[in-house]
Image: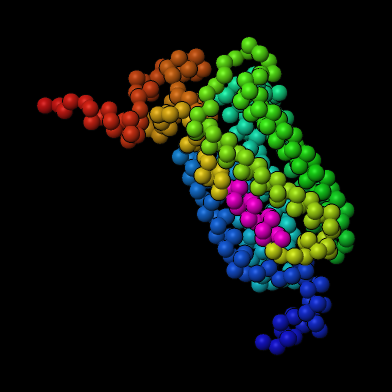
């Protein structure tokens, strides 16, 4: 291949790279690798959410994975068409706005659930306030970054300076980091007070047991928080450095501190999954109920506790068949009961 073809008609390689939006050509095999990895973890998240009936994981972890898939698809496109602006803008908006924000929301929800188990009296905020405040902050950060991303994309597509939109995005990321920092401080205070048995509001509830499952769930939340925080620091430095700076122009920084961090955070949630770790020992997730009972089970199941006839009667004014509290037929408990029943003559 001639040097002219290698540089797409530009006289020198430096001149060509200056014209490329990334200031480098994304490596094709790395883009394909991350695309495959994010596809796998996202499919697993979708299956886990459906299997355990944890529907809030669809607009959080699954949407985050879809954002990463879109972003890495665009980078793969750029590896073959490095001068095109569309894939660059597509991946920048996907990575900077869509992907990380819903993933952060999973941490906020999980901590609120853990606090409910161990004792809200040890927490500065109630579990409900955790969800309201921090999910609200996540939504504000998403909105600010979306406005900045749209402004930066519009400027870049018209060959104008995108720094104005970048500064707005930087404000959104700063706000998100501040919320994540406050969340981490409050979580650390809660765990310290729980371990020392020093509640914020004495005499307001019983102290829950820190089971092995909850320990593993806390480990998963800590891993996700740390990985996302590293990624947020990188993005902040990148935007401060500018759209033509060294940080945004160095490919391995992006691969290591954005792609790898978000992927590992998603895998951590796959491994330390609330469907396994936040349900009570022996509790079964039902898939064999008729529609009305299943709907109620799903609503109650979001709190990881079974449907009772009293719940159905009180909330829906309907009676529940006797099997509603029986173990699922193909669960370990269901099979055990089945085989213990005497055979009919």
Q: Residue at x 82, y 77 (%)?
A: 15
Looking at the image, how many numbered discs can be counted on the residues?
0
- Residue in the image at 77% along x and 82% along y: 9
The answer to which quarter of the image holds residue 130 is top right
- Is residue 256 inside the magenta stretch? yes
The chief SS type of the magenta part is helix
Please identify the quadrant where the C terminus is shown.
Answer: top left
Q: Nearer the viewer, residue 224 or 345?
A: 224
- Residue occupying image coordinates x 55% and y 49%: 267
The image shows residue 67 at horizontal and vertical percentages of 64, 52
Q: Is residue 48 left or right of residue 67?
A: left
Please identify the quarter of the rendering in which residue 321 is found: top left
Q: Residue furthest left?
A: 345
- Residue 40 at what x, y percent from top left? 52, 54
Measured along the vertical axis of the image, is residue 25 above or below residue 267? below
Residue 59 makes an appearance in the image: no
Question: Which residue is at the far front?
Answer: 196
Residue 84 vertical placement versus 190 (above, below): below
- Residue 149 sits inside the magenta stretch: no
Q: Residue 282: x, y in percent?
A: 40, 29
Residue 46 place in picture, x, y as percent: 52, 45
Quarter in which the N terminus is drawn: bottom right
Tell which residue pokes out farthest to the top in this image.
Answer: 203
Q: Nearer the viewer, residue 125 or 26?
A: 125
* Residue at x 75%, y 65% (from the top left corner): 250
Q: Which corner quadrant of the image does residue 215 belong to?
A: top right
Q: On screen, 108 above or below 199?
A: below
Q: Magenta segment, which residues?
A: 253-266
């Amino acid at each position: 291949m001639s040097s002219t073809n290698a540089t797409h008609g530009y006289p020198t390689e430096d001149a060509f790279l200056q014209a490329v939006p990334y200031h480098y050509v994304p490596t094709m095999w790395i883009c394909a690798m991350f695309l495959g990895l994010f596809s796998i973890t996202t499919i697993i998240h979708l299956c886990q959410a459906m299997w355990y009936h944890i529907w809030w994981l669809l607009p959080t972890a699954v949407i985050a994975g879809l954002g990463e898939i879109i972003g890495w698809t665009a980078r793969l496109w750029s590896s073959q068409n490095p001068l095109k602006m569309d894939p660059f803008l597509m991946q920048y908006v996907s990575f900077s706005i869509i992907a990380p924000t819903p993933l952060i929301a999973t941490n906020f929800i999980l901590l609120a659930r853990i606090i409910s188990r161990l004792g809200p009296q040890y927490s500065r905020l109630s579990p409900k306030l955790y969800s309201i405040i921090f999910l609200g902050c996540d939504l504000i950060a998403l909105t600010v970054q979306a406005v900045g991303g749209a402004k930066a994309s519009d400027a870049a597509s018209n060959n104008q300076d995108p720094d104005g939109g970048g500064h707005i995005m930087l404000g959104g990321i700063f706000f998100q980091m501040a919320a994540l920092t406050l969340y981490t401080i409050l979580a650390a205070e809660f765990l310290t007070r729980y371990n020392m048995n020093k509640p914020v509001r004495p005499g307001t509830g019983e102290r829950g047991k820190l089971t092995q499952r909850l320990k593993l769930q806390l480990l998963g939340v800590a891993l996700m928080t740390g990985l996302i925080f590293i990624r947020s620091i990188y993005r902040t430095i990148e935007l401060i450095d500018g759209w033509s700076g060294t940080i945004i122009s160095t490919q391995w920084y992006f691969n290591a501190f954005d792609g790898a961090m978000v992927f590992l955070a998603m895998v951590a949630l796959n491994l330390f999954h609330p469907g396994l770790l936040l349900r009570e020992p022996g509790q079964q997730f039902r898939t064999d109920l008729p529609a009305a009972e299943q709907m109620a089970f799903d609503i109650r199941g979001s709190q990881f506790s079974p449907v009772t006839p009293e719940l159905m009667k009180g909330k829906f004014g309907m009676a529940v068949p006797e099997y509603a509290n029986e173990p699922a037929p193909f669960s370990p408990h269901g099979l055990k009961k089945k085989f213990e029943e005497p055979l009919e003559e």
